[in-house]
Amino acid sequence: MTSKLAIFFILLFNIGLSQNPLPLIPQPSTVEIHKGNFVLNKETVIQADAAMFETQYLHQAIKTQTGLDLKIVPTTLKPNKITLSHSVTHTNSEGYGLMVSNKNIAIYAEKSEAFFYGIQTLLQLIPSEKNNEIKVPCLLISDDPKYAWRGMHLDCARHFFSIDFIKKYIDYLAMYKFNTFHWHLTDDQGWRIEIKKYPKLTEVGAWRNGSMIGHYNEQKYDDKRYGGFYTQDQIKEIVAYAQQRHITVVPEIEMPGHAVAALAAYPQYSCTGGPFEVEKQWGVLDDVFCLKDETFSFLENILTEVIALFPSQYIHIGGDECPKTRWKNCPHCQSLIKEKGLKDEHELQSYFIQRIEKFVNTKARKIIGWDEILEGGLAPNAAVMSWRGTEGGIAAAKESHFVVMTPGSHCYFDHYQGNPKNEPLAIGGCTPVEKVYEFNPIPKELSKEESKYILGAQANVWTEYIATPEQVEYMIFPRMLALSEVLWGTSSPENYGDFEKRMIEHFAFLDKKGIHYSKAIFEITSEVMPKPGGNGVLYLLKSNQSPNGIHFTTDGTNPTEQSKVYNQPLEITTSQTIKSTYFENDRAKSNVAEQSFFIHKATSQLVSLQNPPNGNYAMGGGFTLVDGIKGDKAKFGQHWLGFSGTDLNATIDLGHKQKINRLEIGLLSSPSSWIYFPKKITFWVSEDLIKFEEVTTFSSEEIQKSNGQITVNCTKKNIQFVKVSVENFGIIPDGQPGAGNKAWLFADEIIVE
């Protein structure tokens, strides 16, 4: 693609936005709105160095969205101009100033990247309309970002995306002032980068003979040959394209785990010698790189070619989810542990990471890896991406290592972003826009000095369940708008409503360009609350639009504009299904929101928990277990209480002594998400909270056989208290996703009848 065509391609996506009042994202550091407007017309000129990419970018953008073909001049004394003026306006090299008066527009900056960010802000102020005169509001902006690493990730190993789409993805990042593209290029399911010294990596490793279909839990596959890879020339093209837009491309070459695609091509670098096949299944596999000298030579040769292609300071080497099964049974690896005086296989992994780091350092680069690289001792100069929460990042920062925060709780854009019932299939979890917006990359546990090691954050887009460019767009928009403001440093969670209004203004732009995005924020949202005195729950419905636009039914039919109007919390005292829809001007504006309730003797009664649930899956605390809603086993984004490595011990006060006939609890298993059925479950009953009688215990085998839906007949009189003890699975075994980590225990409704 020629440079002019490349410029034109990106600028097709930089259509300006209407002003109501100023829908700028990310919000600038300071904005002063003045009276009047600058009138952009065919006589307006751009005063700047025509050789600058930013000048050409601005010229083409204005032409594309307004139809005005402005002249570029080196200098002029006349008014009615847009000036790119070199000036030291900020200590931050990415800082810029933007002044719009009724006579001129000026962007002040020292560095080209700062001009680029100022241009992005200006383009959001220019309405997208073909007109001879365009009004731009007078204002004064002083702006610079808080974080140095403002990233978006894309996994191209599970599903492969074309060069054209990678450029689009970079365009999207540029529009919202991201500056880092983390490109995940290798995994068990595919090797996507040409390595000239090892041609089989792409001849063999880039292709698999089928893929999982449906969710991991279903264990279904197709038999379609699937794959693709990027040539080194294409890599260079992408890197150059990103550099023009001031985006650093950070490649990820996975090691020592997630290596099956590479081992399928070169099995001699494994512990067993193979043979191997590029993996069809998502998740984590036992076969990893063996720590032979030949393996290190192999990986160093690969990294030499990678480093030559990518000028980024950091090279991502993965380091996550590396099972130790093969190492434990490998004579060579066990001999190396003894030779180096290592304690165990975890220290062996640390030895691997440190040896790779030393090599990368000889190339004047640094490594960055997922937080598992902390295990066994962190390599001296390594940076950490903290994904299993923020704990790894906190530990690394306290040891004076640089950190990029990317916790699953706020930054995993492969999670659902609305009600899973209305969303495309995803891996699980629920991360709506508002949750992204409330993220603070700097944990409160860090001191001011330690906080300096937080480089920033990024969102991760893992593509096991994202097979098309349209689905990638849907999963990143509009959540990346929220993250852009977080990383620019101007987010304000208490003023989320203001951000949401600005975000909705951007939807017109996304619609115009045919960019797919989730409209989950328009959905009717709900909240379930205890009903005082028990005997049911209160069901609250909410909409971001008119409060009187929600209509609902209780008879199983879909709502119409003639259905009942929601105006107060609904009292749910019997088992039933509520369907609701938002209407405006006699038209449905939202999907049908459907919620089924199962009301029983424990509904809304007091629940005491011995161990608190994990903060990311705490929902309504103990009330989640008696809220009348059963968790969805297929889409477990909501209504499950999650415990990481701890047991569930719940005691329910039924309010008064009564006869009970049946006890039930629902449990979830999803090993790909580290969720396991428990070791055992015990039910107890009591009249007085002092003496408990054991009803029955279920073994792990019985739990597996029931698929987690545990029911016990229990004819007892004068019972006021029910206790359920659920023992966590423990440590995840080798060969499974998350091996060596604490298993999650997920439970939903405890039913008493």
Image (cartoon, grey):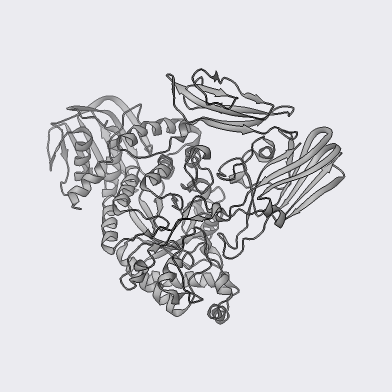
Q: Position of residue 670 (x, y in %)?
A: 58, 52
Q: Residue at x 53, y 55 (%)?
A: 219
> Does the rendering let one see residue 390?
no
Q: Residue at x 37, y 72 (%)?
A: 362
Q: How many numbered circles are shown? A: 0
Of 271 and 149, the residue lying toward us:
271
Q: Position of residue 473 (x, y in %)?
A: 38, 44
Give the residue furthest to the front.
223
Q: Position of residue 727 (x, y in %)?
A: 72, 54
Quadrant of the image occupied by residue 585: top left
Query: Taking 366 as reference, is 74 above or below it?
Result: above
Of 490 and 267, the residue lying toward us:
267
Q: Residue at x 28, y 41 (%)?
A: 13
Query: Taking 490 as reference, is 385 above or below it?
Result: below
> Does the rendering let one see residue 508?
yes
Query: Taking 31 as reference, is 693 above or below it?
Result: below
